[in-house]
Amino acid sequence: MRAAAPSSPLNPFLRKLENYTRLSAEDRSAAVRLWSERPQRFRAKDDVVREGEDPRVVRLVIEGWACRYKYLEDGRRQVLGLFLPGDICDLNVFVLREMDHFIGAVTPLTMAQISRELFEEVTLAHPRLLQALWWDSLVGTAIQREWLMNLGSRTAFERITHLLCEVFLRLSAAGRTRGLSCEFPLTQTMIADITGLSTVHVSRTFQAVRDEGLVEIRERVMTIRDLDALQVASLFSANYLHLGREGRHLDANCSSEDGPLPG
Amino acid sequence: MRAAAPSSPLNPFLRKLENYTRLSAEDRSAAVRLWSERPQRFRAKDDVVREGEDPRVVRLVIEGWACRYKYLEDGRRQVLGLFLPGDICDLNVFVLREMDHFIGAVTPLTMAQISRELFEEVTLAHPRLLQALWWDSLVGTAIQREWLMNLGSRTAFERITHLLCEVFLRLSAAGRTRGLSCEFPLTQTMIADITGLSTVHVSRTFQAVRDEGLVEIRERVMTIRDLDALQVASLFSANYLHLGREGRHLDANCSSEDGPLPG
DNA sequence: TTGCGACCTTAACATAGGTTGCGCGGTGCG
DNA sequence: CGCACCGCGCAACCTATGTTAAGGTCGCAA
């Protein structure tokens, strides 16, 4: 058994990075400096960045949920990724000249904006922090790969339960769960665009998930009734999240008592 | 109109990087040094790296095709990405402790193995090369996102034609096409695992693609009959490949007369 | 030569999931 | 107040794609 609460109960960014490496006090305050840089607010459904724009800053979710998405020419929409509190959008974006997708606010949202200069200054002075950021970025692309598994190989039921599992564990790594509960603001339409299903079929399938007694969602809060069963049902294997300490996500310890929980 | 052939006709790695930036002679020879480091050969279907292993080197395709893939617990297989000649597997892998997927040889394969030390030494001395590598790595994750679009939002017909388009343009960026022809060693079983379809349905759909006169594949060589129509049919938009020069991929210039073509 | 294993094709049939359409309750706003 | 719109549920019906099974070709090894 490890001691429960790491150093920074209120900062999901730091909390997440410290799953990977122990950071020095200086590293931590450097991270906090990035975290609090030029916060910018968005209303739910607003776009943060639009396809075709020139990416000038690195963005970081301070509060709220965001997503990557893209349309096919004929209007079909696909959500390509979710950004939860503490998530960084793209470490190196400024290398490219043009965004190939949108980033939009799922809920009311606050994001930090880190200029290339500041980013380079801070990471140059704090290589260990930089390494933690690389790690986080690799986990991001591993998550993208797992979404490919979802869309390519899993059934509707498995896709949805897998998504619930993943969201819960990611929030847990950021210290944003309480027991087996966490915020869950996704509408069924969003879930449909994430999982490549129709809203009708999401509704049907969600019904089944509830009927099996796996989770309960009310007023934008999800409570998992049986995490083990949920993982089995969704063919979930947490290795792609690279959570450093083995089995961490299955501990009772994974939850925090201090994370704010709307509702 | 630009002049046709860049400096390094025989090296797809260099060729691809130079789509993005002009490199100095020193940068180029540094790239060639990476390119020729500790080549290792594999037979078709052999694994290059296995899930669970500790990634110690950066790998780079010298010749042949490879892929990322993964199994679900019950045996369903999903291909998560393709590596073509000149492609790098993962820039930063050594940050993580454990592979969460396999990398396997699709054809007979030769890969360079670059140690962390060599990689850091070379890129420290050649920041412009490093930037080109970052660009390439971002394009890699953009391709992964486009595969998500494929699986989540496109029909079987669109998925398959989109794949053909993408492969052709990627090979073209590496100087490995001749006119509208290129190597194409994927079996229908592979295509099924890439597109999340059954082999039977791939066969059916391929039939339709041929019947429409869009492409022809014989003896592992693909010839595109109508590139525009293929792009339209697959809802293909090349922006995610970030090919630097606008419209480049649609030029006649995109093809090289010098690339080796089996068959 | 024979046999075997990849790879592809086709056909008949089964089903997961899409589509259309309606109803209902909340909620934000003119 | 009333209206519009969103999120959700439900039912009837439809279709793209999966499944099973069989046969054909090729290359290759015994």
Image (cartoon, coloured by chain):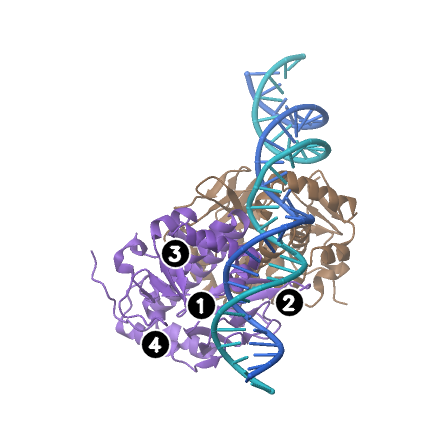
Chain colours: A purple, B brown, C cyan, D blue
Q: Which of the chains bears the disc numbered 4?
A: A
Which mark is on residue A185? 1
Amino acid type of disc 2?
A: Gly
Q: CA distance from mark 3 to mark 2?
A: 47 Å
Q: Secondary structure at mark 4?
A: helix
Evaluate whether label 2 is on the same chain as label 4. no
Labels 1 and 3: the sequence-earlier one: 1
Counting the numbered discs, the total is 4
Amino acid type of disc 4?
A: Val
What residue sits 41% from the left and 77% below the top? A121
Which mark is on residue A199? none
Circle 2 or circle 4, nearest the eye: 4
Evaluate whether label 2 is on the same chain as label 1. no
In the rendered image, the vertical position of residue A191 relative to residue A111, given as above or below: above
Q: Secondary structure at mark 3?
A: strand
Q: Which residue is mark 4?
A: A32
Amino acid type of disc 3?
A: Val
Q: Which of the chains bears the disc numbered 3?
A: A
Q: Which residue is mark 3?
A: A215
Q: Which residue is mark 2?
A: B244
